[in-house]
Each structure stands twice: as C-alpha cells, then as structure tokens.
C-alpha cells in the first residue's frame, strides 16, 4: 500500500467524529485558509510597493552622493578659476617673482581656500612653482607634493580642459583621493593669450565624505566600482558609488550603509495587517462557533441525551422542547412521532413474540431431536447393511461332516478350526453390535432429555449447575463419529474442566456444533477429517474452542451465521441450530462466536462459560 494512502488513512482515523468537533475543524480550516489568502494578498500588494519606495530611496542616496562629490569638486574648480582669471597670476607667469609667491602661496591663503596643493605650470608642462600644505598641522608635505607633481606630469591639460577655461576631477595620490582643479592663466578680463595653467588640489577623506553625505561613509581606493552598486543585507543596504577621475574612469568608491527602514516598515505593516486580519477571522470564527453551538449543537445534544435515556430505560417518552419553526423544531417533531410509532410497534411485537417464541422453541427442539436421532439411524443402517459373519449353509455342512466318524482326523481338525473361527467372529460381531446399541441408547437418552426439558426451558431461565465440560465433549464426540458417512478423528483434552452451566443445553450446543463441523468436512468432498477441541481457563472463564478442517466460510459472513434461516450451503434450509445455540449460551451467561480465515481453511467455534470455582474446588478436595 503506498505511503500516501497509509498517511491519508491515518489522517481520516484522526478526524473528529462528533458534529461539533467537525464544525470546529471546518471553521478552523476556513480561518486558516482565509488568513493565508489574505496574508498572501497583502504580501502581493504591500511588499512590491515598499520595495519600489526602497529602490527610489536608494536611487536618491546615489544621486545625492554624486551631487555631493560634484559640489565638492566644483568648489575647487571655482577657486582655481579665480586664480586663473587674475592679472596677478598672468603677470607672475610672464615674470615670476618672490613677492607673488610669498603672498599667493602663503599658508594662510591656502588655508582660507581649503586647498592642500597648488602649482603653476607652463604651456609646455614645466612646473614653475608648487606647494603642498598639511592644513591640520600647517606644515609642508614634500611626499604629497611629489605625488601631486607626478600626477600633474601625467595629465594632458589641453585634453582635460576640452576647450573650457577650467575643469575639475578626482585623482588618486597614492592611497588618498583628492580633487584636482585646472584653469588657464589669463587676464582678469579674459584677454590675451594663456600663459600656462594653475592647478589646485584638495584631499577628500572618509571623514569629509561622511560630513558631505551625512552618513558614516568611507573611501574604497583599492576596489573602485564602475557604476553604482547596491548590495542587500538583512537590516541594511551597502551602497557603493564610483568617484570618477579624468575621462570618467573611476579612481575610488564612496561606500556607506543605509538602514532598510522602508523594508522594515513594510514588513511591520504586513505583519500588523496579517495579524489583524487573522485576529478578526478568529473572532468571527469564535462567534460563529458559539452561535452554531447554541443554535444547533446544544439542541442536537439534548436529542442525543434523550435517545440515550430511551435506550437505557426502554421508556419511549417524547422529548419536551420549546416550539421552534426551524429545522431543529422539525427534527424534534419527527423524533417524537417516531417514538410514538415505535411504542405502538413494540406493543404489537410483544403480542406476537409470545406466539413466535412458542413456534420457534418447538422448531428448535425438533432440530435438536433430529441431530440426536441421526446417530441412531446411522447405527441401525450399518447394522442392517452388515453381512453375516459366516454362511449358515457352510456352517451346517461343516457340523455334519464333523459328526461323521468316518472323516479323517486331519479333516476333522480343519473343520474344528473353521468352526472355532466362525464362532469367534460371531462373538466379536455381537460385541460390536452391543457397543453400537449402547451408542444408540445414549443418543435416544439425549432425545428424551431434550423433550423432557423443553417445557421447563420455555418458561424459565435454565438452571445452572457445575458440570464437567470435558466429559460432555467426550460423550458428544463418541456420538458424532456415527453422525455421518465420513471418518472423523477427534482430539480433546482429558483433564476435567468445570463450568457453571446447564449440562443438557451445553450438550445440545456442542452436539449441534459437532454436527455442523461434520457437514463442513463432508462438503469438502473428502472421506475423512478431524475435529479438535481445546479448553482453557482464564479470568474466571472457561473457553472451549472447536476446530475443524472443513470448508470454512468468508469472515464477512460470520455475523450472518446466527440469523434464522441463513446457511452457507446452497439448497439447504436451516440456520435455526446456530441461532438456538447462540441464544442458549447467552441464557447461561456465556457467549458463542464463529470464526474462519476464509473458504477452505476450516472454522472455529469459541464457547465461553463462567468457571465453577467453588464447585471445582469442592470436587478436587
């Protein structure tokens, strides 16, 4: 059997059988399905909306980052443009002088501009003057100056400006990032040919980036991303925005964590909506359960209790309920009408039961008498069919020859031996005849006992006495050997077993069961069979099991065997024997059960009686 069928069968066995439990289970299932459907619907509606809002917020963060970086670079470009479009710078590039250098490259001037590095470059790319100032300490930083000059040396100024007067972009100075601004050196009014370039550099640190973005950010110089990347974590989003240099190539990444507030809000809203919906469904289901219990289940329980009262007491009293115009009121009216009809039918059945009981008792007695007379008929038939032991004419001839004195001695000895053997065979036949007559006498004695006890059995409960069931089995087994044409071997215990029963009734029941077993063996078509009897005592009971190797019967028909008129063999009218046997066992406080594993496997009859403990103890003593 497949596993899913086994699991389904177990599930069906676990389903509650009461109407109230079924309704509760159905309502619970509906509530669960409804809650699941509503939760799914809310998830389909709420989750995508908040995901879109979260994506829009992330895009806003990316754009603000780009804007902040562009603004940071534009400030440097404005400052470098001021120095480029200045007559002082124009004159200095035409004729460098110490005074301009001390004034324009002073620490205070660079600090006020927020510039770390500054340089003047000729149109041929030669550096006229360069300085790098550590604004925090106010000291020059030769190593950073060297890095700046190295970076300036790699820049194509004409290509970088692309026809403009000024530009700005980010450059990498070792493991640091700076904004580099470039502007042409011209007069203040923009006239005259350009005499070179002025550059300014401002460092961008993680702290400055965090101040710009108003979030805790850091610079990732080693792994710049080509485009904005958003990585989702459990409670936050990791955002990486490229910091682009000359030509748009990324030189670093601005990375920071953004809390997923919108996702958490959407999740909380989904849980709140789902929880509220489930709670509402549970309240609705609870109210429905209470209403169903009050309007349907309680009236049905009152009907059920009244039915149990009628079943226990036997009094067909009507159910008194308030008049109702619904289905429950119609059910109560129909129920009371049924009780009224049953009361009338009971009176009719009681009037007919007496007559039927008399007729059934008589038929049962005749059935038992027939079973008891079968051995007598068999014994007489065997006796009539048995041929003579020796031919009478042959015996007379042998006697005549033996009386003749002229017969030789050897012949006389043979005749004497022949006559002795004939007389011995006749004696054995007489003994066998006497044994068979004794069996017939026992069978007739059973008939007389059945007829003698009938009147007493018809009017009162059979008297119960202590009787040895082993002796009753042995006696009926001896008689049953002659109840049919088959050769039947009997096996039964020899130890006495005492039961509290009516000896005559038990003998009739066992005789009926032996007769049925013999018929079952004959129905197989065999000439021989076996019947075994086992007796055991357990929990104050005597259990007698009669087994045969006859035709058996289907287990489904076991309960029908005790019905009047039912028989497993076609063409046979009967069934009164087993019906009577079952009633007789019940009358003695016992029981009778018939069992079989199927056609061709034989059958078992199990009789149960009360053990006669006191009688058995007294007899044993």
Image (tube, helix red, strand yellow):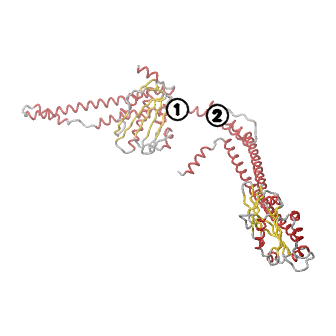
Closer-to-camera residue (113/300): 113
Quarter of the figure with residue 262:
bottom right
Farthest residue in the right direction?
Answer: 189
Badge 1 is on which residue? 357
- SS at circle 1: helix
Q: What secondary structure is marked by label 2? A: helix
Q: From the image, state whether disc 1 or disc 2 is nearer to you.
A: 2
The residue beneath circle 2 is 308
Asked whether residue 167 is in view, the answer is no
Contact check, label 1 and label 2, Cβ < 8 Å: no
> Between 140 and 204, which is closer to the camera in this rendering?
140
Q: Quadrant of the C terminus?
A: top left
- 119 left or right, relative to 348: right
Q: Which mark is residue 483?
A: none
| Residue 37 place in picture, x, y as percent | 72, 53
Furthest toward the bottom, the residue is 193
Q: Is residue 575 left or right of residue 75?
A: left
């Amino acid at each position: 059997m497949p596993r899913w069928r086994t699991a389904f069968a177990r599930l069906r066995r676990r389903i509650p059988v009461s109407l109230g439990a079924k309704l509760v289970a159905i309502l619970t299932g509906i509530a669960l399905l409804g809650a699941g459907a509503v939760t799914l619907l809310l998830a389909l509606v709420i989750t995508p909306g908040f995901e879109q809002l979260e994506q829009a917020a992330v895009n806003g963060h990316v754009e603000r980052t780009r804007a902040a970086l562009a603004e940071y670079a534009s400030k440097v470009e404005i400052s470098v443009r001021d120095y480029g479009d200045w007559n002082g710078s124009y004159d200095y590039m035409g004729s460098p002088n110490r005074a301009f250098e001390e004034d324009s490259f002073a620490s205070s001037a660079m600090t006020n501009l927020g510039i770390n590095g500054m340089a003047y470059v000729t149109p041929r790319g030669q550096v006229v003057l360069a300085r790098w100032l550590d604004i925090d300490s106010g000291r020059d930083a030769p190593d950073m100056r060297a890095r700046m000059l190295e970076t300036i040396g790699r820049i194509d100024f004409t290509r970088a400006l692309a026809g403009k007067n000024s530009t700005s972009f980010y450059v990498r100075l070792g493991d640091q990032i700076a904004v580099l601004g470039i502007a042409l050196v011209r007069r203040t009014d923009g006239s005259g040919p350009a005499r070179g370039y002025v550059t300014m550099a401002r460092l961008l640190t993680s702290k400055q980036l965090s101040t710009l973005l108003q979030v805790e950010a850091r610079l990732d110089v080693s792994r710049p991303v080509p485009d904005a990347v958003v990585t989702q974590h459990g409670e936050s989003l990791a955002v990486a925005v490229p910091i682009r240099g000359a030509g748009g190539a990324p030189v670093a990444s601005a990375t920071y964590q953004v809390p997923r507030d919108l996702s958490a809000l959407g999740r909380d809203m989904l849980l709140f909506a789902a929880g509220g919906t489930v709670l509402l469904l549970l309240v609705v289901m609870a109210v429905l359960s209470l209403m169903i219990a009050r309007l349907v289940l309680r009236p049905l329980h009152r009907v059920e209790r009244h039915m149990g009262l009628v079943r226990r007491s036997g009094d067909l009293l009507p159910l008194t309920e308030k008049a109702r115009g619904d289905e429950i009121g119609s059910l109560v009216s129909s129920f009371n009408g049924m009780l009224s009809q049953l009361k009338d039918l009971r009176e009719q059945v009681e009037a007919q039961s007496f007559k039927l009981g008399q007729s059934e008792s008589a038929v049962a007695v005749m059935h038992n008498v027939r079973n008891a007379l079968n051995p007598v008929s068999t014994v007489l038939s065997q006796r009539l069919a048995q041929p003579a032991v020796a031919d009478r004419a042959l015996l007379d001839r042998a006697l005549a020859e033996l009386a003749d004195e002229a017969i030789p001695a050897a012949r006389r000895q043979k005749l004497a031996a022949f006559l002795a053997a004939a007389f011995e065979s006749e004696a054995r036949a007489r003994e066998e005849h006497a044994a068979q007559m004794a069996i017939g006498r026992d069978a007739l004695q059973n008939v007389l006992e059945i007829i003698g006890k009938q009147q007493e059995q018809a009017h009162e409960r059979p008297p119960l006495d202590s009787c040895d069931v082993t002796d009753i089995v042995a006696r009926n087994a001896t008689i049953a050997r002659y109840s049919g044409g088959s050769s039947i071997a009997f096996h039964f215990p020899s130890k006495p077993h005492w039961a509290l029963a009516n000896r005559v009734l038990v003998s009739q029941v066992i005789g009926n069961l032996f007769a049925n077993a013999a018929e079952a063996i004959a129905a197989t078509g065999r000439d021989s069979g076996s019947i075994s009897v086992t007796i055991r005592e357990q929990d104050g009971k005597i259990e007698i099991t009669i087994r045969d190797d006859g035709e058996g019967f289907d287990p489904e028909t076991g309960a029908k065997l005790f019905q009047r008129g039912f028989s497993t063999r076609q063409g046979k009218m009967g069934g009164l024997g087993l019906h009577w046997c079952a009633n007789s066992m019940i009358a003695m406080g016992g029981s009778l059960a018939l069992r079989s594993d199927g056609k061709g496997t034989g059958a078992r009859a199990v009789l149960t009686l009360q053990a006669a403990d006191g009688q058995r103890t007294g007899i044993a003593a």
